[in-house]
Amino acid sequence: MASIPKIPFNVPCNVGGELRYIAEAINGNQKISGDGPFTKRCSEFFQHRYAVAKAVLTTSCTDALEMAGLLLNLKPGDEVIVPSFTFVSSANAFALRGARLVFVDSREDEPNVDVNRIAEVITPKTKAIIAVHYAGFACAMDEITTLAQSRHVDVVEDAAQAVESFYRGRRLGTIGRFGTLSFHETKNLICGEGGLLFVNRQEDVKRTEIIREKGTNRTAFFRGEIAKYSWVDLGSSFLPSELNAAYLFGQLESIDLIQNRRVEIYNRYCACLKVLEDQGKALLPVVPNGATINGHLFYLLCPNLSVRTQLIDFLKSQNIHATFHYVPLHSSEYFSEFHDGRVLKNCDRYSEQLVRLPLFFAMTDEMVDIVCSEVLKFFSQV
Ligand SMILES: *Cc1c(COP(=O)(O)O)cnc(C)c1O
């Protein structure tokens, strides 16, 4: 039997400079805890490129979202609107503050949140809307922003998957009051575990520094602005070590190389698999109005759960690792007893029909072509 080389779902990206910078962090007699020279270089990189009031590195995107929950002063009884089709951290971060989560459905034509569904559940208790840019594709931010402003509600962008993606010319993560990125090994830019918080209003900068430094004013102390530092607010330890920041800086130096290659792979998948759409066998991703492609992930929508399961099993038998995405949060084991019973049918459909194909920086054109030919072979038989 002709054997196909094993094609994993993801291989952590390594472009070459990472190890050199980690060695520099260790050998340079510099500190290796948080907020040393590499953390500074990474945060300045984003602050300039994204033109935000402040960009701070965190230990994960989850932690950046938890910081947003603290910065919004969420209290028990406050309501936060979250898409159900997302990673658990988009919700957990706000549940941890005691907020009541209200899950809403995806759009029919793409997995991002449906703004009309947000409008239906917004109440005077609503404090925040979490906009998750699925697959790096922008949510309808104009509509979300207009709705949020008219109801005096804040917007947090979970841009974990959306680094270097835009909405009508604006970078994702910089449009809401806060935005977050992830540098988990499955994302476009990585450092093992890591994240970033965009603070888009000057008035939030000071408290951001305090919350990130365990509730102390140590950042101002290190800048020489105060004589000693002490406990001034709630906070936690959200600083990544310099070793992580050094790895990340190696990636940032090659950001265009990484992004261009991922977008190439994404486009190659589209070109090879478009025929499935023409034949009515599966759907390809829809790029929403005003959105851009950042090559974070490539997915297909199968006609139903059974076909999706068979496709994943078939690819596995051919040594190719494909995977589904997101068990809905509103009906999850933890949350279902709190959900108000609304049926979120689009979310359920994406959860059952969506399959993600391998996409990683080191993936060769040949590997993409192998995956495509196996996918086409599968669909020629169903
Ligand atoms: C990956 C991801 C997260 C969590 O990122 P971590 O850095 O692993 O905490 C949160 N939200 C979304 C949408 C993600 O894809």
Image (cartoon, rainbow, N blue to C red):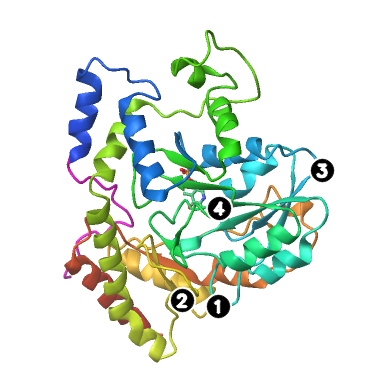
Question: Which image quadrant for residue 16?
Answer: top left
The residue indicated by pointer 1 is: 109
Which circle marks residue 157 in the picture?
4
Residue 269 x, y percent position in the rendering: 30, 73
Counting residues from the start of the chain, the first of labels 3 and 2 encountered is 3
Q: Quadrant of the C terminus?
A: bottom left
The residue indicated by pointer 2 is: 286
Q: Which residue type does callout 1 highlight?
A: Asp
Predominant secondary structure in magenta?
loop
Counting residues from the start of the chain, the first of labels 2 and 4 encountered is 4
- Left or right: residue 357 versus residue 76 is left
Q: Nearer the viewer, residue 2 or 57?
A: 57
Q: Which residue type does callout 4 highlight?
A: Glu
Counting residues from the start of the chain, the first of labels 3 and 4 encountered is 3
Residue 122 x, y percent position in the rendering: 77, 60
Q: Which residue type does callout 2 highlight?
A: Val
User: Which element is circle 2 on?
Assistant: loop
Q: Nearer the viewer, residue 115 or 202?
A: 202
Look at 57% across and 25% down and name the residue there.
210
The answer to if 341 sits in the magenta stretch is no
Counting residues from the start of the chain, the first of labels 1 and 3 encountered is 3
Measured Cα–Cα span from mark 2 to mark 1: 7 Å
Measured Cα–Cα span from mark 3 to mark 2: 37 Å
Whether label 2 touches label 1, CB < 8 Å? yes
Measured Cα–Cα span from mark 1 to mark 3: 33 Å
Q: Nearer the viewer, residue 39 or 110?
A: 39
Q: Nearer the viewer, residue 290 or 380?
A: 290
Whether residue 3 is visible, yes or no, is no
